[in-house]
Amino acid sequence: MQPDQRGLGDQAFGKDADTLVTVQYQSYRDALKFIQSVLRSPKGVGVLHGPDSSGKTTIVRQVQAKMPDHTAVALLDGTDLRPHGLLSGMLSQYGYHTGLESTGELLQMVNVFATQQTRSAQPPILIVDNVEHMYLSTWRTLNKLSMLTVRGRFAIRILVTGHHGLSALIASESMSDFAKRQFGIFTIGPLSGEETMRYLHTRLTACGVQKPDTVFPVDSCERLRELSGGWPGLINHYAQEAICPGRPRLIITRNGETVLHYTSASKKIMIGRSKFADVVLEDEFASKIHAVLLLYSNALVLLDLNSSNGTTVNSVRVKSTILKENDIISIGHHRLKVENAPAISDDIANRLHEPDTVKMRNLAEMRRLRDEYRKTAATEKKNRG
């Protein structure tokens, strides 16, 4: 592992990592072929489908970057995009800063530019990412743009990206003209297990890691593929967490008032009324040695240590369970909210209610831990005396 783990995680898998290296995989290559066919087509309209973190934005940025210098390309984010922003953004990226305020005048200017380019056999390209988040009025403007023609030829090549529900929006009455031009739809697929490993190792190598399999061996790559579903944005997220994980944190409240923020410094967190506990709860309904949290690489486990009044998680009484992000532990009058819990794999999730969770025999483990902490408390008391 590298000495600066957080720096490595940010460089290889952070928000700016795509500028360092682009890792191609089958669905990525297929998406590029689809886009190329759309932009060559006389109809020139395409829809790129995929969930969040599927790599849509990375793909369209690559398309824009690889266009010849003489090609007019505008790439806009559709999030909260209004008609004025759509038209002025297009003109700005085409090299025109008009200062026009009227949407009608901007639309006319786009028409003039598109006409000139199309007559020169170089029709401009418009790419709108996250198109489902545009205002309805912007959809109508996009519909108008889709019908601009020069001598019977469409004047603007259009590519939009969004979620799977995008087809219903395109089929709506406000997009009737756009739908008539539609050339095709491509749905992005996730990375396979082998592609995930190559993706991870290629990014680490680009950051100077000579042996990337020491950072992410095969089983770790498989684990990241399982957690992420093979979507590149989620692979980045979980890879960063794996390289420099956030420590579990407890936000402890009593009667709605926050009394303590506790961040784990070890793999065991003892909770109870005893002053020897890591998290001390001044609560008559808490046992001296009430519960313990055990941190593993793939799970944060809660064990009730045979307390008098019991422990609940999300209002369900438990003897042992694996904790998830934002779970609420209730002990007496106190509530402990869990943050930065390790993500749970499908295999672990299926074993949540098994008595041998995470290969631990609960009764024997509880007895051992209780005896261990009793000995520790007795030793410390003797040393102070």
Image (tube, helix red, strand yellow):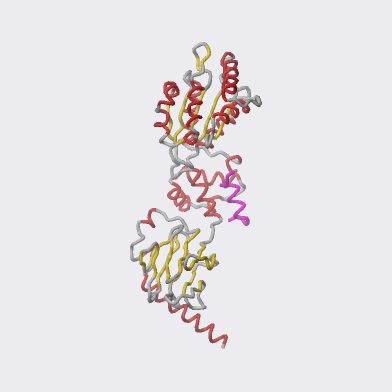
Residue 113 location (% of width, % of height):
60, 19
Farthest residue in the left direction?
354
Please tell me which residue lies in front, 190 or 334.
334
| Quadrant that contains the C terminus | bottom right
Whether residue 99 is visible here, answered yes or no, is yes
Farthest residue in the bottom direction?
385
Farthest residue in the front direction?
102
33 lies above or below 200: above
- Seen at 43% across and 70% down, the residue is 331
Residue 9 location (% of width, % of height):
58, 51
Picture quarter containing residue 67?
top right
12 in the magenta segment:
yes
Q: How many marks?
A: 0
Which segment did they paint magenta?
A: 1-15
Residue 97 location (% of width, % of height):
66, 26
Chief secondary structure of the magenta portion: helix
Picture quarter containing residue 62?
top right
Residue 16 location (% of width, % of height):
60, 43
Please tell me which residue lies in front, 359 or 289.
289
Please tell me which residue lies in front, 243 or 185.
185
94 in the magenta segment:
no
Please tell me which residue lies in front, 95 or 381.
95
| Quadrant that contains the N terminus | bottom right
382 lies above or below 236: below
Whether residue 37 is visible here, answered yes or no, is no
